[in-house]
Amino acid sequence: MNSLCAKLALFLLVVLVVGKVRAIESSSGGDRTANPRWTVRPMNVNCPQPACTTAKDLNTLWASPDATQFVRCRPAPTGYWMIELNPCAPGTLFQFSKQACVATRNWSSC
């Protein structure tokens, strides 16, 4: 009986997923690249990892893996430092080498 229930649940799951995919394809004219939910965000790879230990570290903006965000060191209530995730302005990406969010056409990874 448990095997039958498991097979039925799996079948219903497959039917739901296929229905959602078809709904997405029909809403975007069959071209998934036209749907903004399918876009890939640029990634900051090989950037230095955030460190909040020295004075230089505390004054450095660090790259987040998602280039639409950056990390900075902030004082924690405990007296130590913690990292804080901050967004870039719309249409910009964080570039570690420039220590700023730049226009997407000017961006390059670390």
Image (tube, rainbow, N blue to C red):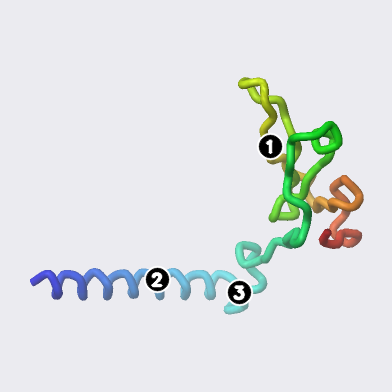
Q: Which mark is residue 83?
A: 1
Taking the image as shown, residue 8 lies to the left or right of residue 53, namely left
Mark 3: which amino acid? Answer: Arg
Residue found farthest to the front: 54
Task: Count neighbours of disc 3 (C-alpha within 10 A) and say few if under 14, some if 14 to 19, many if 20 or more.
Answer: some
68 or 25, which lies in front?
A: 68
Q: In which quadrant will I find the N terminus?
A: bottom left
The residue identified by callout 2 is 17
Mark 1: which amino acid? Answer: Ile
Vertical side of 12 occupied by 64: above or below: above
Would you identify the image quadrant in which residue 3 lies? bottom left
Residue found farthest to the bottom: 30
Would you identify the image quadrant in which residue 70 lies? top right
102 or 81, which lies in front?
A: 81
94 or 49, which lies in front?
A: 49
Task: Count neighbours of disc 1 (C-alpha within 10 A) and say few if under 14, some if 14 to 19, many if 20 or more.
Answer: some
Taking the image as shown, residue 61 lies to the left or right of residue 78, namely right
Where residue 34 appears, as percent x and y from the top left, is 66, 71
User: What residue is drawn where x is 61% and y is 62%?
Assistant: 37
- The residues tagged by marks 2 and 3 sit, at their Cα atoms, a distance apart of 16 Å
Where residue 50 appears, as percent x and y from the top left, is 73, 45
| SS at mark 2 in the image | helix
Whichever of labels 2 and 1 marks the residue nearer the N terminus, that label is 2
User: What residue is drawn where x is 72% and y is 29%?
Assistant: 74
- The residues tagged by marks 2 and 1 sit, at their Cα atoms, a distance apart of 38 Å
Whichever of labels 1 and 3 marks the residue nearer the N terminus, that label is 3
| SS at mark 1 in the image | strand
Q: Are marks 2 and 1 in contact (CB under 8 Å)?
A: no
Q: Are marks 1 and 3 in contact (CB under 8 Å)?
A: no
The residue identified by callout 3 is 32
